[in-house]
């Protein structure tokens, strides 16, 4: 029996009002509108049960929101370009799915509310995407907000919660991420006929990211997100890509297609399709979605905590040092009779830490190459940082490795000089 994929395809689309209301004023805006039409036809052919929208223009600060009003309609004018005119909109919201999404996100420990009252404002981006992709409400819709403070692990977890909701509701979805690539807007009026990407550097980074997505290299694109965000002012740090990665989970391969790449008021506006070549599934096991793991091979914990905890599709590993299971000897450390450190070798300790983390991850069905975030604790930053970095490069690099935070601490629970705490895809 063939496994049905929960997500048949996803799209990244821009959400500026110009594409809907002023396409005739600029060849680039007209081109984007035509490309939207191509995507609309693909969605009709896919015939999903629901279209799930996430827009970087629907910003939440305290947790997350999902739209839960079954019949959403109104008139909207963009607050920046109100002179373009108003946009009528209507959404047929799948309320039961929205409530399930809110429940799954709440289970991850986040505040999440289902918006269920009339008159709640809908953002320009979601309206533009709906009007161009699903104008007759042929398909039900769902919307989830973009939390301005959500980091990589959290945002990926939100994506996975949506997939879990699709599984629980037995829905087949098309996913639409409304996001610019580079997000530099012109700060003065520009003739639409002269619209162009804000800077050559923005254009270079947009094309680099588009090249990776066109190859379907989602993991490589994820590794470039921090650089892209810093170099090209990517829209909301391009965290929408983290959300997509969380939706798909690990082990999926993609075919990518770039439908269009233009500028809207200086921004990098692209329409991209991602088509999973393996079914997107979600295990029906809440017992597995939250579980602790105590390793049989790693050094014993020095407190009442597990070596790792699985939450959905993510694995949170406790702080791990260089100690060896069943031994009081610490690799690379020489102690006096009172247990004070006489000498230590940060190179030996760092290698031992990585081996311990590798052991824990592999026992949990994960691996070092699935680590998405790493926190480093050093007791002597000035003395050890350079040497630690040298060893770290043997395991991770800035091209494909995780995000990282390194801090100095006064001491650690045992006489060690380094400890790591990681988050990995399960």
Image: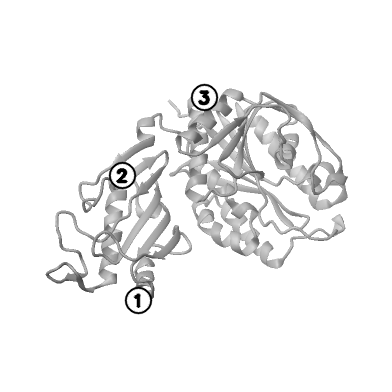
Occupied quadrant, residue 128: top right
Q: Secondary structure at mark 3?
A: helix
Image point (56%, 52%), residue name: 215
- Quadrant of image for the C terminus: top left
Q: Nearer the viewer, mark 3 or mark 1?
A: 1
Q: Secondary structure at mark 1?
A: helix
Circle 3 residue: 169
**Looking at the image, is 388 positioned above or below residue 92?**
below
- Quadrant of image for the N terminus: top left
Badge 2 density bin: few <14, some 14–19, many ≥20, Cα 10 Å: some
Question: How far is the residue under mark 1 from the one under mark 2?
Answer: 34 Å
Occupied quadrant, residue 305: top left
Locate residue 415, reporting x and y percent: 23, 64
Badge 3 density bin: few <14, some 14–19, many ≥20, Cα 10 Å: few
* Residue in front for this viewpoint, 322 or 139: 322
Disc 2 to disc 3: CB gap under 8 Å: no
Left or right of 44 in this view: 313: left
Question: How far is the residue under mark 3 from the one under mark 1?
Answer: 55 Å
Locate residue 95, reporting x and y percent: 61, 24
Question: How far is the residue under mark 2 from the one under mark 3?
Answer: 28 Å
Q: Which mark is residue 324?
A: none
Circle 1 residue: 383
Which one is earlier in the sequence, the residue at label 1 or at label 2?
Answer: 2
Badge 1 density bin: few <14, some 14–19, many ≥20, Cα 10 Å: few
Image point (44%, 61%), residue name: 405
Locate residue 145, reporting x and y percent: 61, 40
Locate residue 288, reporting x and y percent: 35, 34
Image point (36%, 41%), residue name: 310
Circle 2 residue: 364
**Looking at the image, is 367 positioned above or below residue 346?**
above
Visual colour scheme = one colour
Occupied quadrant, residue 121: top right
């Amino acid at each position: 029996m063939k496994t049905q994929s929960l997500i048949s395809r996803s799209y990244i689309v821009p959400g500026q009002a110009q594409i809907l209301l002023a396409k005739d004023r600029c060849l680039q805006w007209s081109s984007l509108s035509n490309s939207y039409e191509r995507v609309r036809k693909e969605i009709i052919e896919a015939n999903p049960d629901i279209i799930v929208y996430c827009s970087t223009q629907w910003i939440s600060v305290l947790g997350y929101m999902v739209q839960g009003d079954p019949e959403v309609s109104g008139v909207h004018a963009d607050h920046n370009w109100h002179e373009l005119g108003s946009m009528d909109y209507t959404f047929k919201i799948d309320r039961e799915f929205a409530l399930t999404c809110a429940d799954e996100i709440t289970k991850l420990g986040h505040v999440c509310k289902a918006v269920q009252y009339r008159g709640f404002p809908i953002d320009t981006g979601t309206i533009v995407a709906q009007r161009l992709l699903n104008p007759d409400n042929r398909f039900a819709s769902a919307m989830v907000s973009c939390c301005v403070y959500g980091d990589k692990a959290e945002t990926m977890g939100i994506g996975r919660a949506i997939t879990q909701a699709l599984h629980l509701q037995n829905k087949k979805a098309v996913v639409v991420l409304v996001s610019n690539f580079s997000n530099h807007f012109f700060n003065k009026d520009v003739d639409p006929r002269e619209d162009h990407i804000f800077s050559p550097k923005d254009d270079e980074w947009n094309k680099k990211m588009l090249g990776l997505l066109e190859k379907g290299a989602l993991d490589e694109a994820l590794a470039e997100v921090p650089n892209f965000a810093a170099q090209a002012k990517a829209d909301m740090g391009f965290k929408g890509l983290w959300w997509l990665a969380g939706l798909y989970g690990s082990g999926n391969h993609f075919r990518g297609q770039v439908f269009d790449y233009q500028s809207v008021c200086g921004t990098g506006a692209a329409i991209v399709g991602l088509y999973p070549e393996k079914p997107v599934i979600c295990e029906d096991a809440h017992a597995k979605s939250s579980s602790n793991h105590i390793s049989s091979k790693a050094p014993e914990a020095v407190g009442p905590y597990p070596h790792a905890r699985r939450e959905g599709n993510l694995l949170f590993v406790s702080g791990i040092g260089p100690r060896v299971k069943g031994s009081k000897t610490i690799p690379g450390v020489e102690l006096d009779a009172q247990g004070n450190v006489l000498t230590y070798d940060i190179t030996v300790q760092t290698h031992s830490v990585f081996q311990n983390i590798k052991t824990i991850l592999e026992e949990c069905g994960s691996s070092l190459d699935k680590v998405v975030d790493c926190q480093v604790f050093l007791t002597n930053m000035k003395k050890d940082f350079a040497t630690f970095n040298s060893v770290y490069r043997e395991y991770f690099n800035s091209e494909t490795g995780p995000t990282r935070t390194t801090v100095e601490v006064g001491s650690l629970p045992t006489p060690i000089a380094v400890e790591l705490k990681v988050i990995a895809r399960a």
